[in-house]
Image (cartoon, helix red, strand yellow):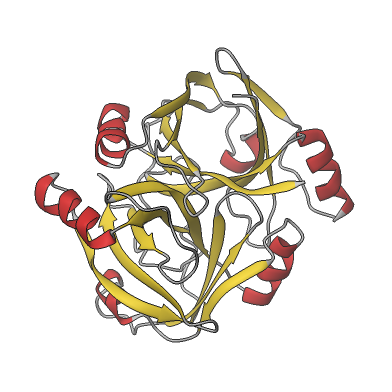
Amino acid sequence: MFLGVDHAGIGVEDMDTALDFWGRKLGFTELYFDYTGPIPGLEEITKTNQVKARIVMLGNKNSSRLGPGKVKLVQRLDGAGAPPYPSGIGYGEIGLAEVCLHTVHTQKIYQELVEKLGCESLMVPLNASVGPHDVELDIGYIADPWRGKVELIEWKGLWTSRPGLPRVEGVNHVAFGVSDMKTTIDFYKQLGFLDQIFESTEFFEPMAPWYQVGRPLPGHHMTLHLSAQGAGIEPVRLTPLYEDCRGEWGHVGPMDFGIGVQNIKKGVAELERLGIEMHSEIQTLNVGNSEYKYVYFRDPDDQYVCLVESSY
């Protein structure tokens, strides 16, 4: 019933800048829809009567099993425009921490993005092996135009990717901070995220520069869970637990994610059977030649997460 992470939602200040970054530089050139208008169903989340935004849904031309997810670019057009990136966010505070893209030949992709295309580096690529299965990977980070974190990862020890030139594929997973790891894992297992790829309880030292100067570095508890389809989730628990960095819906940088379903009415019925609360009724946007149906629901930390059914 639940099809993994369909897309990562990313807030932007300027859509042309965002389309250049995600399209020209990262290869998300498959346009599913470009919608401007009211975004219903967010009244409870945003505490406003009406949200207006431009939403552009993009897929990657190299989408694969390890990078199946899309990106949803959101530019708030109401109020004062795009809310700012949450202040003080490092990695793992409550809220969306990153969007992770699967890449082939991560080092070469990173060099192209940073040295030739002018992207900001947040972490030079390195090779690692993660437990409990000793899965080998290459990992690096760049920033989006508003310093939101974009991870580049190649799961070299998970599955064999088809051969080819260096490339960015689609979204591999979204990472978000949580207040209780077990509660979050148990919750998302109900939604099909059953396969744990890794678990780490050691602080990841290359992330140290991301945290506020003068505060002690937190402990890290990170896990990654995949579904049979779609992209995965990476819950992160900091010790001590830092502040809530969810920010406002539509803030610049990674800010929400959608879980795919084939039939949203059946999906909502299953969530209700599980005792999960909705933030609204099912909403439908007419996005041209198709419909985009969604409903936001409440997870253990009230992240900005929705079910989504699309006909494109």
Task: Classify residue 310 as left or right of residue 166.
Answer: right
- Horizontal and vertical percent position of residue 199: 54, 79
The C terminus - image quarter: top right
- Horizontal and vertical percent position of residue 239: 49, 82
Placement of 207 over or under 72, stated as above or below: below
- Horizontal and vertical percent position of residue 245: 46, 59
In this view, the residue farthest toward the right is: 273
User: Is residue 247 in view?
Assistant: no
In this view, the residue farthest toward the front is: 163
- The residue sitting at 50% across, 83% down in the picture is 131
| Number of numbered callouts drawn | 0
- The residue sitting at 10% across, 52% down in the picture is 115
Placement of 124 over or under 119, stated as above or below: below
Which sits in the foreground, 31 or 160? 160
- The residue sitting at 27% across, 49% down in the picture is 165
Which sits in the foreground, 140 or 67? 67
- Horizontal and vertical percent position of residue 83: 39, 41
Task: Classify residue 113 as left or right of residue 132.
Answer: left
Which sits in the foreground, 100 or 281? 100
Placement of 37 over or under 91, stated as above or below: above
Task: Classify residue 95 as left or right of residue 14.
Answer: right
